Image (tube, grey):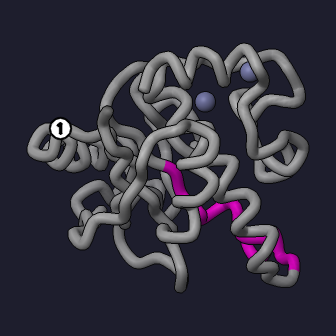
Amino acid sequence: MRTLALVAVGELPKGFPALLIGRLEKETGMSCEVLDESVDPSAAYDSVRAQYDCRKILPLLDEIALRRGDLVLGVADVDLFSPIFTFVLGEARLGGDTGLFSLHRLHPSFYGLQEDQELLWARAEREALHETGHLLGLEHCTNPDCVMKFSASAEDVDLKPAEFCPACAAVARGAV
Ligand SMILES: [Zn+2]
Ligand SMILES: [Zn+2]
């Protein structure tokens, strides 16, 4: 069975990405570890948009995945975009080896609210699990009680559980 390797993409708040391990292991049945190495996202910076291009970060994670033979989930704290979207919370290749997500728009402080570590962690668990689900071949799910439901915003993330629905759990477990 392959391991899910978590890699910091740039600087992260204290405790990340290690505190995501428990939830990811429980829900996917994979073993999960935090790598010592990190990825520098600076080459993916788009100075016009003042955001970082996911599609330039994923190849850096691909190199790690190829070298290790693991699935690799990058965890960032910078604002991410994909060319056709104004921003993305995360991106992963369906059934691929690499994905990433960012804490940037999960911070309550991003919306002018008081920072709340527990809320940030809860959102981050959902986003980490969601992107990992894509790596395990899961597409978006219409079940509102499933972490694979699409989230366009942090508020959407709050509405879903940090769990797969039974149907998605079966696919995820079958893939690892
Ligand atoms: Zn998704
Ligand atoms: Zn589902």
Residue for point 70% across, 61% down: 106
The residue indicated by pointer 1 is 69
Residue 70 in the figure: left or right of residue 121: left
| Residue stretch in magenta | 101-113
131, 35: nearer the viewer: 35
Q: Quadrant of the C terminus?
A: top left
Q: Is residue 30 magenta?
A: no
Residue for point 45% across, 59% down: 75
Q: Position of residue 80 (x, y in %)?
A: 49, 52
Give above or below for 37 relative to 51: below
133, 153: nearer the viewer: 133
Residue for point 34% across, 38% down: 98
Residue 99 in the figure: left or right of residue 113: left
User: At label 1, which amino acid type do we have?
Assistant: Gly
Does residue 139 appear in this view?
yes
Q: Quadrant of residue 122?
A: bottom right
Give above or below for 173 relative to 17: above
Q: Quadrant of residue 142?
A: top right
Q: Position of residue 35 (x, y in %)?
A: 28, 65
Q: Quadrant of the N terminus?
A: top left
Secondary element under disc 1, as helix, strand or loop, is loop
What is the residue that sits farthest to the left in this orientation? 67
Q: Position of residue 148 (x, y in %)?
A: 69, 28
Residue 83 in the figure: left or right of residue 145: left
Give above or below for 70 relative to 105: above
| Quarter of the displayed picture in which ligand 2 can be seen | top right
